[in-house]
Amino acid sequence: MSSKPEHSIRIEDLGGFVQAKEILLTASEQELVAACQAGERKAQKRVYELFSGKMLSICRRYAKSEEQAQDFMHDGFIKVFLNIQKFKGHSSLATWITRIMINNSISAIRKEVRKGIKVKLDKVQLPDASIEDFEVIEQKGISAQEVFDKITQLPLGYRTVFSMYVLDGYTHREIAETLGVSEGTSKSQLAKAKKMLYKFLTQA
């Protein structure tokens, strides 16, 4: 996955709006991971408490409801603890957990997303002028929470491609490979998602 998206909306960070609980750790992150790798329940609970807020927000971007987001998050944490032995410290623990949550959420909805995506064009021309300037939204003082609420109202295909591309840094090629669609379809869904989101926000 790319380090950052080719295009991004210049607006407040949309990664997560529920702040993780502030817990003072007496052990280093490495020691916390080691304790989880040893199967210590207290360490697993602490990891859950530290990251569940942000991870729920991330899952909510892909889920159709709060309940489904909860399911995605719980399944994601099961995978986190089942695969904690594979964590080598090449990235932060938060980044590693986030990747698992995103991959788990996308896997859970992949078939539904493909069914909901109707566009099957291999090449879609999208001139820059066709996408509104989101700086207008910033000038209107719309909060990150308001943007997030509107993102969750987008149709599933639009929401998934928008979240993967704008918020999680996937390229259109990566989205196409992950969802099993063409790059043109990914580009088309993104353009439509941006237009619909812009309409939602300017009418709010």
Image (cartoon, rainbow, N blue to C red):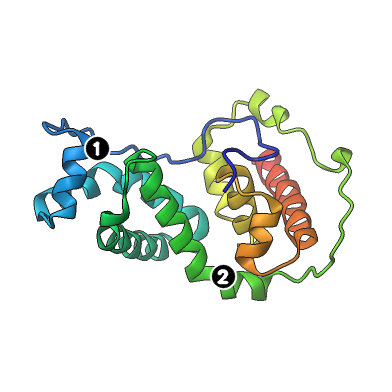
The count of marks equals 2
Residue nearer the viewer, 91 or 118: 91
Q: Amino acid at mark 1?
A: Lys
Q: Would residue 158 be visible to someone looking at this image? A: no
Quick check: 78 above or below 201? below
Quick check: 13 above or below 158? above
Q: Quadrant of residue 100?
A: bottom left
Quick check: 48 above or below 110? above
Q: Residue at x 77, y 33 (%)?
A: 133
Residue 145 left/right relative to 28: right
Q: Which mark is residue 110?
A: 2
Residue nearer the viewer, 169 or 199: 169
Q: Residue at x 50, y 68 (%)?
A: 107
* Label 2, residues with CA under 10 Å away: few <14, some 14-19, many ≥20: some
Image coordinates of residue 40 in percent, x first then y, are 10, 54
Q: Residue at x 47, y 55 (%)?
A: 102
Q: Quadrant of residue 33?
A: top left
Q: Which residue is mark 1?
A: 21
Q: Quadrant of the C terminus?
A: top right
